[in-house]
Amino acid sequence: MTDKPILMALVDASAYSESLCHYAAWMAQRSDWKVKIYHSLARQGGTSQGDYSGQIRLGARSRLLAQLADMDEARAKLAVEQGRAVLEDAAALIRAEGVEVETRLRHGDLLETVAEKEAAAQMILIGKRGEAASQAMAHLGSNLGRILRAAQKPVFIANRRFAPIHKVLIAFDGGVSAKKAVDYIAAAPAFAGLSVTLVFAGTPSDTQKSAITAAEAQLNKAGISADILIEAGEPERLLSRLCDADATSNNAHDLLVMGAYGHSRVRHLMVGSTTTQMIQSCKSPILVMR
């Protein structure tokens, strides 16, 4: 394998993993990066033993425990085979796009995998919902919130249906995370030549006006067509409307980029109760910056 920058893709058996693989391939193609796919298997607990005393004779109890142990072993083997199948299918989707791929089957908590391996990655990709999640809109992937809080690298949250990214919306409030988002988009080869809108919700201060103007100039200098949108209203509603705009309109955006922290109410979108609301309401994928 060549020594290329890495995209870290976290896959499972959910409906979102196929879309995630297409986004990973799209980014890797534009960046000449490779994709490293991870699938984590939860650690198996001990044999389910329960209370088999009472009227069950010792010999019968021992046979039952042996059968339960065999079932646990069979389940563990099945989980490994399923994990390998998930990785093989994901790798096939990405390789079909001419992208270099490595696969890793890991045992243990997914957050442990991210903590151990993210230093070598340019970005982490995860689906909006995992295989264990209900299809109810109120339920997000069980690992998503934990990874957003813990990861140090940008986290790309894939939506259910892949679409090539042409127009990017950056939620900009002048905060540190928002500026890092602009730095990242300006430098990452995957975003070269795209169109970017810097959106500010509310009435900016003079300092914020200067910051957003500087961000526009930085993006334009990097070869990215950038413009500014300043509009009154709640950040959640404004961002959702711009992301959900009809694809034939000039306001349609294919990716929302936002900082995990900021100077205004936008900061609460990724650290408070509004997290679920924002990810639910935005039909486009979201790139979250620390």
Image (tube, rainbow, N blue to C red):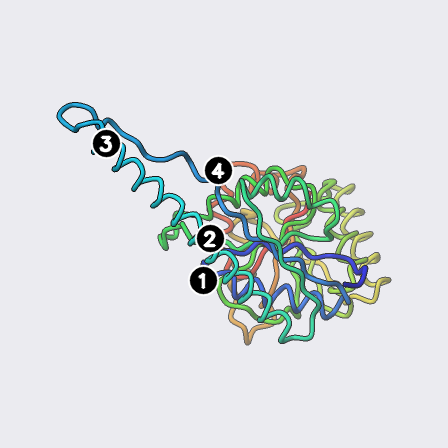
Q: Which mark lies nearer to you, 4 or 2?
A: 2
Q: Earlier in the sequence, mark 4 or mark 3?
A: 3
Badge 2 crowding class, 10 Å Cα cut-off, few under 14, some 14 to 19, many 20 or more, is many
Q: Looking at the image, which is closer to me, 67 or 250? A: 67
- In this rendering, the answer to whether 164 lies above or below 58 is below
Q: Is residue 218 left or right of residue 143?
A: right
Residue found at the far front of this picture: 59
- Counting residues from the N terminus, which is met first, the one under dot 4 or under dot 2? 2
- The x, y position of residue 43, in whole percent, is 48, 40
Q: Callout 3, which amino acid?
A: Arg
Provide the residue designation for mark 4. 273
Q: Is residue 118 above or below residue 256?
A: above
The amino acid sitting under disc 2 is: Arg
> Left or right: where does residue 31 sit relative to residue 199?
right
CA gap, disc 2 and disc 3: 41 Å
Q: Which mark is residue 15?
A: 1
Q: Earlier in the sequence, mark 4 or mark 1?
A: 1
Left or right of 226, for residue 246: left
Dot 2: what SS?
Answer: loop
Q: Residue furthest top?
A: 54
Q: Secondary structure at mark 1?
A: loop
Q: Which numbered circle lies on residue 129?
A: 2
Tell which of 99 and 160 is nearer to you: 99
- Residue under the point 66% across and 69% down: 26
Residue 270 figure quarter:
top right
Q: Viewer-proximal residue, 70 or 174?
A: 70
Amino acid at the residue labelled 4: Ser
Do the CB atoms of the residues marked 4 and 2 lie less than 8 Å apart?
no
> Where does the image place residue 223, in percent across and percent down from the top left?
83, 67
As drawn, the label of residue 61 is 3
